[in-house]
Amino acid sequence: MTSKAERIRIKRASKAGRPRKADVARYPGGQIKHGETEREVRSVAIAARQRMHFSGAKGVDAGSPFAGYTLGRMFLDGKLTAHEREAGDEYARQMARYYSLTGIPFPSVRAQSLFSVKGFEGETTAERTRAARAAANRMMELEGVLLKLPEGPRVKTTVFNVCVMDYEVLRTMPEPQLAWLKRGLTELHWHLGLSREKEAV
């Protein structure tokens, strides 16, 4: 038979601390396995994106892939059409390809990994040289298309700053600058043949 003091000690030991969490993954030692699910991480990121970029807007899907960059946010704002956004995305892809194949660091600071080694081996293969030359020619061709437009240097700079540099401040650009952007993206849309691809499908 146990004494009264022993019974009190057992009672206190069984009720000590907060109640044990049920239905939680645990290590063999009893500690809770901490880990966030993909849905929890995604919800935090979407809430931050909503707070940062769409604070006053109602009904905007902050989880959309277009909400992750300036050109896409301008599309969601209704300032750009779908074909203009497609042209901007393709222009950005072509420029990124040019930078990666030629070994030039990407110009946007946000896209850089400051402590990683950039470039490629000193000796290049003929295939890589051919691909780099083709990418450089393509980049110069696209820049030429933009520069031939009325007010070409302004159009080219605006398209580059929105599509490649991803400057958020340009989301609220004045109407004349928005007209340059739309002019450049429309011309790129036709030059890149995106309209013909749609018709073929």
Image (tube, helix red, strand yellow):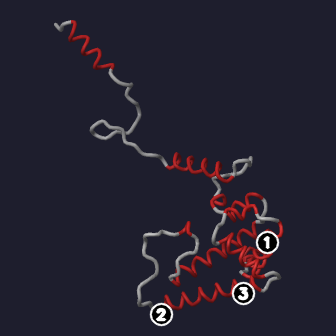
Instruction: Examine the rendered structure and indicate whether residue 185 appears above or below residue 129.
Output: above
Alpha carbon distance from label 3 to label 1:
17 Å
Alpha carbon distance from label 2 to label 3:
27 Å
Q: Position of residue 17 (x, y in %)?
A: 35, 24
Tell me the tag on residue 144: 3
Instruction: Examine the rendered structure and indicate whether residue 169 appears above or below residue 20.
Output: below
Q: Secondary structure at mark 1?
A: helix
Tag nearer the camera, 2 or 3:
3
Q: Secondary structure at mark 3?
A: helix
Please report contact status of discs 3 and 1: CB closer than 8 Å, yes or no.
no
Q: Where, by quadrant of the figure, is residue 153 drawn?
A: bottom right
In the displayed orientation, state which residue is furthest to the bottom. Answer: 126
Instruction: State which tag comes first along the sequence, 1 or 2.
Output: 2
Which residue shows up at 50% across the image and 50% down it?
38
Alpha carbon distance from label 1 to label 2:
38 Å
Side of 141 relative to 23 (left or right):
right
Category of crowding for the residue at label 1, using alpha-carbon neighbours closer than 10 angstroms: few (below 14), some (14–19), many (at least 20): many
Instruction: State which tag comes first along the sequence, 2 or 3.
Output: 2
Which residue shows up at 63% across the image and 59% down it?
68
- Of residue 35 and residue 57, the one placed in the foreground of this image is 57
Q: Position of residue 7 (x, y in %)?
A: 24, 11
Amino acid type of the residue that numbered disc 1 sits on in the rendered structure = Lys
Q: Quadrant of the C terminus?
A: bottom right
Amino acid type of the residue that numbered disc 3 sits on in the rendered structure = Gly
Q: Secondary structure at mark 2?
A: helix
- Of residue 32 and residue 53, the one placed in the foreground of this image is 53
Instruction: Examine the rendered structure and indicate whether residue 179 appears above or below residue 64.
Output: below
- Of residue 70 and residue 35, the one placed in the foreground of this image is 70
Instruction: Read off the residue under disc 1.
Output: 182
Instruction: Read off the residue under disc 2.
Output: 126
Amino acid type of the residue that numbered disc 2 sits on in the rendered structure = Ala
Tag nearer the camera, 1 or 2:
1
